[in-house]
Image (tube, rainbow, N blue to C red):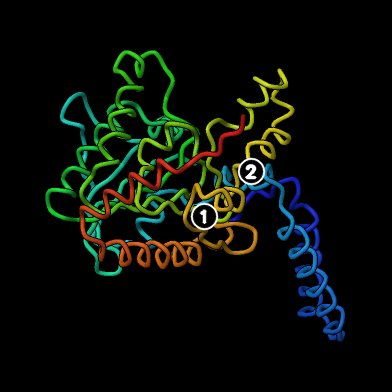
Amino acid sequence: MKTQPLEFEKPIIELEAKLEDLKRHLADREIDLEPEVRRMEEKLAETRAEIYGRLTAWQRVQIARHTARPFFLDYVVLAFTDFVEMKGDRLFGDDASMPGGLAKIDGIRCVVIGQQKGRDVKENLLRNFGSPHPEGYRKALRLMRMAEKFKFPVVAMIDTPGAFPGVGAEERHIAEAIAVNLREMMVLRTPVVAVVIGEGGSGGALGIGVADRVLMLENSYYSVISPEGCAAILWKHRKHAPEAAEALKLNADALIGMGLVDGVVPEPPGGAHRDPETAAASLKSAVVAALREIMQVPTDSLVRQRYEKFRKMGIFQE
């Protein structure tokens, strides 16, 4: 898939274009350009290492939002088998921004739930831009309770800018739906693994994120508020989003250092959208390892450890 380059990637794109042009000349003419091609390839590798080796928090946010980045259902196809989608919350309706169902991962039967975005206007309207309604969270909880009943582990994939803040969502009690999920996931008597695969925005993300193991893809972010929202509050203008992203400590390295996530899943150079198959293989390996570890823990101990894990979060200064 051809991807739209981000602003900071333009030096790489220019070098890639020059290299392709050089290779075309090599094929068309009987001129020995191999030394020049090798030099160009070395320069390209150095430029990639330099740019992707020092990404800022804001640049990682941009990668996390890339429209070509694999979404939840892409990972379901690439990393899971035997997926059967289940719809409806049995109270109001179905929410297409929170698909879920039964699946297998490396032979392990599980319930998989996630937030789904769209790549064009039509799909984004169907998926509500990845911002779930109350019925989405209630459907997720229904599926998690089913997993508990049949002793299946739960895999939740987080990719949302936040829960939908519209009038209809408020009328159907979005805050209550998320709050109930937080409470019920804390005592869910089955293993739970959550993975932030793109955006992890506010309570909308946490509504399916109370888990025994919380993982993050290398270029995802997890935050109490979006950088733009934070900038609008603190600096009174969204143009300060890059400074806000740094201050929020929302990238994977910062969060694992504070003990808020349990592991970082590596991505291909440039982001998961550059090589979705490799990204999916890394995600599958990390999820399977986490599941096999926590599935060995007795249920009572698992629930107690999950509760203690979240109770210990946070640093307070007076």
Give the number of the disc on residue 217.
1
Give the number of the disc on residue 62.
2
Residue 16 quadrant:
bottom right
- SS at circle 2: helix
Q: Quadrant of the N terminus?
A: bottom right
Residue 134, percent across and down? 31, 26
Give the number of the disc on residue 268.
none
The amino acid type, in three-letter code, at marker 1 is Leu
Q: Earlier in the sequence, mark 2 or mark 1?
A: 2
Residue 170, percent across and down? 36, 15
Residue, far left: 149
* Label 2 neighbour load within 10 Å: few <14, some 14-19, many 20+: some
Q: Residue at x 15, y 30 (%)?
A: 90
The amino acid type, in three-letter code, at marker 2 is Gln
Q: Is residue 173 left or right of residue 34?
A: left
Q: Is residue 90 or residue 293 the one in the foreground?
A: 293
Q: Residue at x 40, y 43 (%)?
A: 310
Q: Establish if 197 lies above or below 34.
A: above
Residue 77, percent across and down? 35, 58
Q: Is residue 2 left or right of residue 97?
A: right
Q: Is residue 90 or residue 315 the one in the foreground?
A: 315
Q: Establish if 35 lies above or below 317.
A: below
Residue 231 quadrant:
top right
Q: Is residue 40 or residue 143 the one in the foreground?
A: 143
Q: Residue at x 20, y 24 (%)?
A: 92
